[in-house]
């Protein structure tokens, strides 16, 4: 088996995988529904398996309750009673490629979104693609309601969703090339990725050698609670809307061969994965339909697999999540204080979004 140090992130992907990516990028909803080659994790969960998968193990409900409850603040294990064990499947043609259908329960998904978008996106040390061409007005997140601007820097910053969609200008670093953005443009279309922990250098395809921001402890504990073999040190959070894609690539910039964890939130997405036989040059691939709460673990030979996201499927966000960040009415909030009724102006934002959290270990 190859090691990660023998691979290069700029190597061109195999033609057959690029062709498969284009095919599924253009496929209609009707064609996708009839395509029996697509491995649908939603059906795997309902049907308790699939001939292409082997059952590896089951994560016990009692252990998962501890992990999910500790992700809340304060922990509330009573919300997770009645969970089922989670089955871990491995693809029979891709050694080390494992799937955990419906891993995260709904309340954990909502909390995860809140941590990522209300807290981590407001942290200036977590860079985004928008940083390349625009200044992000983090000062406003601290200045509202602090008495005087910047006077309470130790207070948690506000969420960008605190402001109305047409407010908060994002000025360009080069006015001659780019225009200012409104908050609506930033959150609805321009925000494509955010990095947590190790800040990946997309130009040089490396992680910087200087000290990196700390990876969020609660997210690390959530990931390690389910995937104990990985030490979360970096994550790329991808933001998709229907019509968006991610081209065929490999994640081989890390300095270790530890597996990758991928968590899906929001709309369904097609996930194309393929491996190339170095002796024959032949490639094999599989297309997987991932749904909100599903997890993928790429380990062993599949750690080095080519993969892409050819299509985001519109109108597939779960109904209970589609109104996020406006998740509850005032009465629902009184009944369950963990559910926020703020951000009414942004109600329905998640209905048109898929968020993918890709977690990896950088070093041995």
Image (spheres, rainbow, N blue to C red):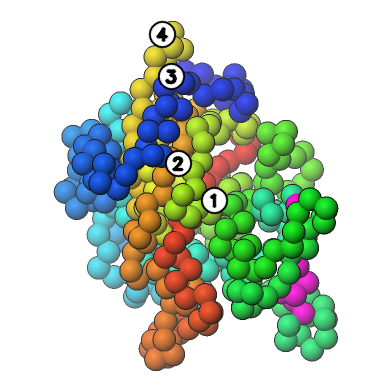
Which mark identifies residue 238?
A: 1
The quadrant holding residue 94 is top left
Above or below: residue 290 compared with residue 76: above
For label 4, the crowd category at 10 Å Cα-Cα, with few meaning under 14, some 14 to 19 and many 20 or more, is few
For label 3, the crowd category at 10 Å Cα-Cα, with few meaning under 14, some 14 to 19 and many 20 or more, is some
Position of 244 compared to 235: left or right? left
Q: Which residue is identified by label 3?
A: 276
Q: Which residue is identified by label 4?
A: 280
Q: Are marks 3 and 2 in contact (CB under 8 Å)?
A: no
Q: Earlier in the sequence, mark 1 or mark 3?
A: 1
For label 2, the crowd category at 10 Å Cα-Cα, with few meaning under 14, some 14 to 19 and many 20 or more, is many
Residue pictured at 48% horizontal, 83% vertical? 341
Which mark identifies residue 309?
A: 2
Position of 60 compared to 257: left or right? left
Q: Quadrant of the C terminus?
A: top right
Q: Which residues are magenta?
A: 133-143
* Distance from the alpha carbon under mark 2 to that under mark 1: 11 Å
Q: Is residue 300 magenta?
A: no
């Amino acid at each position: 088996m190859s090691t990660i140090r023998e691979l290069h992130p700029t190597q061109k992907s195999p033609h057959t995988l690029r062709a498969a990516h284009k095919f599924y990028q253009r496929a209609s909803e009707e064609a996708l529904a009839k395509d029996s080659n697509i491995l649908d994790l939603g059906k795997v969960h309902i049907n308790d398996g699939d001939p292409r998968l082997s059952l590896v193990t089951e994560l016990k409900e009692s252990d998962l309750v501890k992990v999910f409850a500790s992700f809340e603040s304060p922990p509330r294990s009573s919300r997770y009673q009645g969970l089922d064990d989670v089955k871990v499947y491995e693809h029979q043609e891709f050694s080390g490629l494992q799937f955990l259908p419906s891993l995260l329960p709904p309340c954990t998904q909502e909390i995860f979104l809140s941590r990522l978008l209300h807290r981590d996106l407001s942290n200036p040390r977590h860079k985004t693609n928008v940083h390349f061409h625009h200044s992000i007005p983090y000062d406003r997140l601290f200045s509202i309601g602090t008495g005087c601007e910047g006077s309470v820097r130790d207070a948690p910053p506000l969420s960008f969703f605190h402001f109305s969609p047409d407010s908060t200008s994002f000025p360009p670093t080069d006015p001659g090339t780019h225009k200012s953005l409104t908050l609506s443009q930033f959150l609805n279309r321009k925000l494509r990725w955010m990095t947590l922990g190790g800040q990946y250098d997309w130009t040089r395809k490396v992680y910087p050698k200087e000290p990196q921001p700390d990876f969020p402890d609660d997210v690390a504990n959530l990931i390690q609670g389910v995937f104990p073999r990985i030490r979360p040190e970096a994550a790329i959070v991808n933001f998709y809307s229907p019509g968006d894609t991610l081209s065929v690539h490999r994640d081989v910039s890390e300095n270790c061969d530890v597996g990758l964890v991928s968590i899906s939130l929001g709309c369904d997405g097609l996930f194309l994965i393929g491996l190339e036989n170095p002796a024959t040059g032949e490639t094999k691939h599989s297309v997987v339909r991932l749904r909100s709460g599903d997890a993928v673990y790429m380990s062993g030979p599949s750690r080095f697999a080519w993969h892409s996201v050819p299509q985001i499927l519109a109108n597939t966000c779960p109904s209970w999540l589609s109104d996020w960040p406006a998740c509850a009415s005032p009465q629902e909030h009184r009944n369950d204080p963990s559910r926020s009724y703020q951000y009414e102006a942004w109600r329905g934002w998640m209905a048109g979004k898929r968020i993918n959290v890709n977690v990896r270990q950088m070093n041995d």
